[in-house]
Image (cartoon, rainbow, N blue to C red):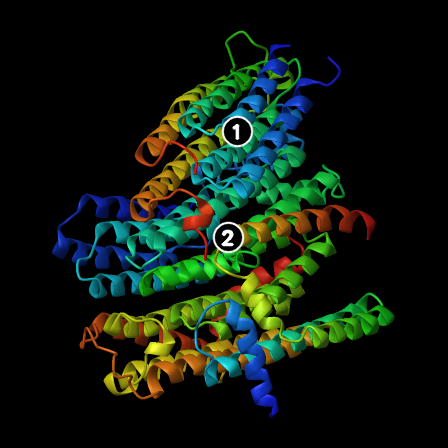
Amino acid sequence: MNLYDLIVKKIKDIQAAGDESPVTNISTSSMLTAEITLVSSILVALIMLRLVSKVLMIVAVLVVLFAALTAMPLMPKFKKEQNDSLASMMFYVVIALAIVITLFYWGNLNV
Amino acid sequence: MIIDVQLASLFTAVALIVIGIFAAVFLDNLIKKVIGLAFIGDGVNLFLISMGYKAGGIVYIYLPGMAADWFAQNAAYPLPFALVLTSIVIGASTMAVMLGIIIVLYKKRGSISASKILGE
Amino acid sequence: MNLLIALMVIVPILCALFLNLLHKRDRTIKVVTVLLALALPALPLLANYGLHYFGGYAPLVENPTLSANLPSMITGTALNTFHPAITYSFQSAQQLFVFILGLVALLAIFVSLFETRRPSGVYAYMMFMGVAAVTAVILTDDIFNLYVFFEIAALATVGIVLVSNIKGNYETALKYMIMGSIAAPLLLLGIALLLGVTGNVNITDIIYSLKNGLVDPQNPVLLMACGLIIFGWLYGSGLPPFHTIKSAIYSKALPSGAALIQTFSVFIFVALGIIILRIFSYLPFSQWVILGVSLLAMILGITMAILQTDLKRMIGFLAVGELGYIGIGLGLSTAYGITAGLFQAVNEAMITALLFLGFGVVLYQTGVSDTRKLGGMMVKNPLVALMVLLAGFAMAGVPPLNAFQSKLMLIQGSIKAGLPELGVIMILLSIVTFMTFMKAFHAVYLRPQPVDLEIKNEKIPKATLIAMLVLLGVCLIFGLFPQIATSYLQPLATSLAGGML
Amino acid sequence: MIVYILMIVTILGAVLALMQRDLLKAAILTGVPGASIAFLYQYLLAPDVALTQAIVGSAIIPVFFALAVYKTRRVEE
C-alpha cells in the first residue's frame, strides 16, 4: 500500500461519518493541498513571533509542528468546524467577541 | 440611594445586552431568538441615552427666559438622543424583516426551530 | 460646499425609490434603469474634491460672520473647529473607490436586467440602495452616519439574497441577519463608548480630541470601543468568524448580485479599516490585530475554498481570502503598504466581480453550480472561457494584470516593513489560489461534458459579454499603468501612515 | 426611586418574556421592557426619544411578534 492509498483511506475514514460524497482524485488532492497550505502558512506565520522573543518562536514552531504532525489530517476537522449550521457559527462569533474584547482590554493595559 | 441613576441605567443596559446575547445564542426557538436580538438593540439604545444624562440636569429644550450660560451648564447632552431616534427605527425595521423571513420559512419548512431549519 | 458629493448618495436612493414605482412595467424599467445607473460611475468623476456639510453648518472657523458675535468661551476653544454637521469628505482616494463601486454596480445592474427573464424593480431597488449605502460609508466622516448606512447596506444585501430564487436563500439570509443583529448593535456600542469619552461623533474631531489631550488616549473605555468597532468590522467585511456566512451569502445570490455584494464587502472593509487606522493608530496593538485577522482570513478562506465543490461557494471563500491581502496592506501601516492594500482592494473588487459574472454565465446556461456535474463548457463559449481564465490569472497575480502589481507592492511593502514572512505567506497563498481557480476552471470548461448535463439557454446575453469586457479592460489598464490608481491612493495612504489626519 | 423600579421591571420583563413557553405571551411580554424603557427615557431627560420608544417598543414591536406568532405556531417545539 503506497502513500497515496494511505491518504485516501484516511480521508475515507473521516468522511464516512459525514457526507457521502465520493472520494475522487480531485477531492483527495484538494484535501492534501489544503492540509499542506494550512500547516505551512501557520508555521511561517509563527516565525513572526521572533519580534517578541526568539526562544519563544523556536519553541512555538516546534510545538505546533509536533501537534500538527500528530493530529495530521487537520483539514477535515477544520471543514467540519466551519459548517453552515447557525449554532456553530454563533458559537464562533461569541468566542471571537470574547477574544477581541479580552485582547484589547488586557493586551493594551499590560503590554 | 447608593449608586447614582446614570450608573444604574448603564448596568441595566449591559444586563439587557447580556440577556439578549444569551437568548440569541442558546434559545432554539427562532421567535425567541429574535426577541433576544430586540433586547440587544434596546440595551444599546439605553446605553446611549444614559451617556447623555446629566444628574440634576434639565431637558435640553431651550425655553424663553433661560440664561444661555445656565442652560449650557444644566441641560442634558442631546447628541446621543438624536442618534437613538434613528437607531430605534433601524432596529424595528430589522426586526420586521427577520420576522417576515421567519414566516416565509415556516410556510416552507413547517418549523420555527433553529436547529431544524438552520442546521447544515 | 460641493453639491455633487451629496448627490453621489442621493441619486442612487432616488433611483431606487423611483424604480419601485415602475413596478410591472418591464420595458420601461430596463431603459430607465440603465440610464439612471450610468450616473453612478459618472458622478464621482464630475465632482470636485472637498467637504460637504449637510444643512450647510460649516465649522465656526469657516464662518466668520457667525463667530463674531459669540463669546470667547466658544470661539477660543476647540469648539471653534468642531464640525456641527454630518460631514462627507471626498478626496482622490474616495473618488477612485466610488468610481469603481459605481462601475461594478452599473455593470451588475446591466447584466441583471438582461439575464433575468422578467426584470424586477425590487431587485434593482435593492442594488441601488446598497450602492447608496456603501457610497455613504466610503464618504462619511461621521461615525454614527456610518453605522446607519452600514445597517442599510446589510439590509440591502439581505434583500439581494432574498430576491434570487436559489434554494436555501431564505435560511442563509436569516442566519446572516441574526448574526448581524448581534454584531451591528455591538458596533453601535463601540461608537457609543467613543461618543461617551470624546463627546463627538465626527471622526476628525475625535482624532483632534485624542491628539491634543482633550481626552486621555489610554482610557480603558477607548480600548473597549476599539475592540467593539473591530468586531463590527469583522462582521461588515466577512472576516473570520463571519467568513462562512459571508461566503454562503455570496453563493445564494444571483451572479450579478454576488458580484455587487462582494464589492460592498470590500469597500466596507476598506472604509472601516481606514477609520480604525485613523482613530486608533496610537495603539500599536490594533495594527497587530488587523494583521492577525487578515492572516487568519487568508489562510481559512483559501484553504476552505479548495475543499468546496460548489462553484459559487468556492469563489465566495476566495473573495474572503483575498480580503486578507488588503488587510495585510492596511496592517503594515507604512505609506507604501497602505497604498498597496488600497490598490489591492480596488483590484479585488473588480476581479471577483468579473469571476462571479463569468461563472454566472455557466449558471445561466445550465442552472447547475456543482463542479462535479459540470464540464465541456469551453466548446459552447470559448470567449467567456478565455475571459474567465484571464480573470483567474488576474486574481492569482499573473503579469500584466492588475493584481500582479498590487501583490508585488504588498510583498515589497512587507519586506520593507521588516516582516518578510508575510510576503512568503502571500506568495504561497497566491499559488494555492491559482490552483483552486484552475481546479474549478478544469471542472467547468476543460473536462468532457457529462452526459446528463443539459443546456437550458444556448444564447449568452450580449450585456454579460460587454460587462466582462469592460471589467477586463479596466483590469488590464490598471495592470499596465498602476500609477493611474496609486496616484489617487497615495495621499490618503501617506496621511494614514503619518498619523496626520 | 421610581427609576430603579423601572430598571428592575425592565430586566425582569425581559427575563420573563424569554421564559414563557407560550410564544404569544412572550410576544406580549416584550412590550413590558419596551414600555418601561420608554418611561426610563423620560426620567433620563430624553422626552422625545421616550415618545418614539413608547410607540415602537411597547406597541409596534410586540404587534410584529404577535403577528409572527399568529402566522407560525403558538407553542414552542
Looking at the rendered structure, the secondary structure element under dot 1 is helix
The residue positioned 58% from the left and 83% from the top of the image is A7
Q: Is residue C98 above or below residue B53?
A: below
Measured in 3D between alpha carbons, the distance from the residue under mark 1 to the one under mark 2, in whole angstroms, is: 32 Å
Instruction: Give D10 or B74, whichever is nearer the viewer.
Output: D10
Q: Is residue C430 visible?
A: no
Where residue C97 sits in the image (x, y, percent)? 45, 60
Position of C299 with respect to C236 (left or right) is right
* Residue D19 numbered tag: 1
Label 1: chain letter: D
Where residue C300 sits in the image (x, y, percent)? 57, 67
> Residue most toward the right?
A55
Position of B62 with respect to A103 (left or right) is left
Task: Please report contact status of discs 1 and 2: CB closer than 8 Å, yes or no.
Answer: no
Where residue C223 sits in the image (x, y, percent)? 70, 45
Instruction: Give C339 or A57, whichever is nearer the viewer.
Output: A57
Position of C60 with respect to C479 (left or right) is right
- For disc 2, the marked residue is C236
Q: Is residue A46 above or below residue C143?
A: below
Question: Residue D12's quadrant in the figure?
Answer: top right
The residue positioned 62% from the left and 26% from the top of the image is B12
Q: Nearer the viewer, mark 1 or mark 2?
A: 1
Q: Mark 2 Cα within 10 Å, few/some/many (few <14, many 20+)?
A: many
Q: Is residue C274 above or below residue B82?
A: below
Question: At label 1, which amino acid type do we have?
Answer: Met
Instruction: Give C245 or C75, whichever is nearer the viewer.
Output: C245
Quadrant including the N terminus of chain C: top left
Question: At label 2, which amino acid type do we have?
Answer: Gly
Q: Is residue C29 visible?
A: yes
